[in-house]
Amino acid sequence: MSRYQDRKERFPLAWIVPGVLLFLWQVSASLGWLPATILPAPSAVLAAGWALTLDGTLPANLGVSTLRALAGLVIGGGIGFGLGLLTGLSRISERLLDPTLQMVRNVPHLALIPMVIIWFGIEEEARLFLVALGVFFPIYLNTLHGIRNVDPQLIEMGRVYGMSPRRLFRRVILPGALPAILVGLRYALGIMWLTLIVAETIAAKSGIGHMAMAAREFMRTDVVVLSILIYALLGKLADSATKALERRFLRWNPAYRR
Amino acid sequence: MSKHKGAALTLSQVSKRFGETDVLHGVDLSIEPGSFVAIIGKSGCGKSTLLRVILGLEPASTGHVSSDSDAAHARLVFQEPRLLPWASVAANVAVGLGERGDGPEGVAAAREALADVGLAAKADDWPSTLSGGQRQRVALARALVSHPTLLALDEPLGALDALTRIEMQSLLENVWQAQGFTALLVTHDVGEAVALADRVLLIDAGRVALDQPIDLPRPRRRGDAAFAALEGAILERLLDAPASAEAR
């Protein structure tokens, strides 16, 4: 128990290793052991970040990438959630749709990139399509799984206590499925960024991935590393957002209460 | 607390089959309004099925169940508390009110029902913070909040420890005496049946094998000679009954 109680005291301990690594990286870059063409110094990356923020390139690309990611998430996640509800609540829909969807799931969505470029070129639709397809499956699968795993005793209780189907869904099935749905969302957010990195790196005229590829042409490794770090940061941010959602909506669950 | 009338029930030639298996064979029964009836029997004797047929959760295969008024309003307490873990204790009790439970009156009624089971202070807590006995008391409050005329209990105390169980029995007796509903208690505990019921029905192989009135004065004491004699006689009768082959 006490290991958890002194969480605050342990906290700085976790920062020692990354701190030392960062320090070694900076020192080796400054002393010239590490050529800037291989790996630029952390200070150079920070400087690049500052310069690109000032000239507006970074905020513009960050905005474009975030918008793409969220639009893809809303479209693909929305369809996945809707179909997950449909197949979760109706056996006929499940038998009709689920086998096909499970089959399509085995196609790696990134393998479709050549087809997607043929269909959409390198326009916005291509990236939206890929992101939407990527986030669709984790949300679909976990929504279906969550609904199927709602305690049948609670559903029976709801029926015996006279709940209408609508009320049963709102009061019992949806809250019961929510933990699984949020797990799906967390997976989806990871896939969302990953898909966007690939899509923007291969075929885009803007966005963080495009910024990194353009910088590569001029050997601007500082900008490339900056782009990578920003992707990492965005991923962490998305993860923290889901954790916050879990703490908000799963307060009732002792496992999420802190 | 207002006194509510209990429902009277009449079962005539009620039978229930599941596929090839006969679970109930022509049960005839009439239950007095406001009485406390315990239904005992071995596992698989059909006692839970009888309860579910009476409540209308399972249709009878033949025969019918009738109640004295259309207004008869039944509630069931399960063996498990079956509380919604994502709803507060008060919101769980308000489930018993249906759509009416959503407004402020629903919350007030839920709090009142919680006070009746001695859990007023827990109204805003999550069910996961309660003990097993407290959860079952919340389930009882959820059943009582709508003032049923018939309260059916399907082995509601089976999962509780011995001490909590005795506390729950006296709580159950108190709310029954205060509210006047008809109580149908399915239990496998003969002592519990004798402690609470006006009448003990022993079900064996889908039939009423024994219909034993219990007219001991309340509150009943388990150490009592008359209590022990009745308990012993019923237990003996229960053990003598040939094991029924049918599944529940």
Image: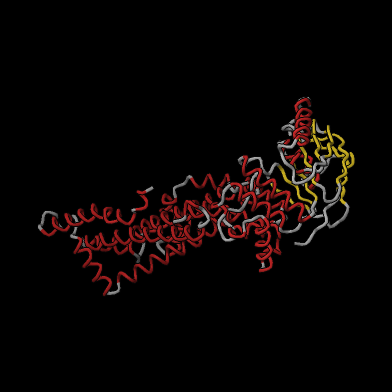
Estimate the x, y position of residue B71 in percent, counting from the top left: 84, 57
Q: Where, by quadrant of the figure, is residue A198 drawn?
A: bottom left
Q: Would residue B60 be visible to someone looking at this image?
A: yes
Q: Residue at x 42, y 54 (%)?
A: A191
Q: Where, by quadrant of the figure, is residue A223 drawn?
A: bottom left
- Judging depth in this view, the residue of A227 and B77 nearest the camera is B77
Residue situated furthest left in the rendering: A31
Left or right: B124, with A50 as reference point: right
Estimate the x, y position of residue B100 in percent, counting from the top left: 71, 64
Colour option used: secondary structure
Above or below, A237 relative to B62: below
Q: Residue at x 65, y 43 (%)?
A: B165
Residue situated furthest bottom in the rendering: A55
Estimate the x, y position of residue B237 in percent, counting from the top left: 79, 28
In the rendered image, which quarter contains the N terminus of chain B?
bottom right
Q: Would residue A170 be visible to someone looking at this image?
A: no
Above or below, B52 relative to A187: above
- Judging depth in this view, the residue of A34 and B74 nearest the camera is B74
Estimate the x, y position of residue B128 in percent, counting from the top left: 55, 51
Above or below, A64 relative to B81: below
Left or right: A141, with B37 as reference point: left
- Judging depth in this view, the residue of A136 and B152 nearest the camera is B152
Left or right: B29, with B153 as reference point: right
In the rendered image, which quarter contains the C terminus of chain B?
top right
Q: Residue at x 12, y 60 (%)?
A: A30
| Number of numbered markers | 0
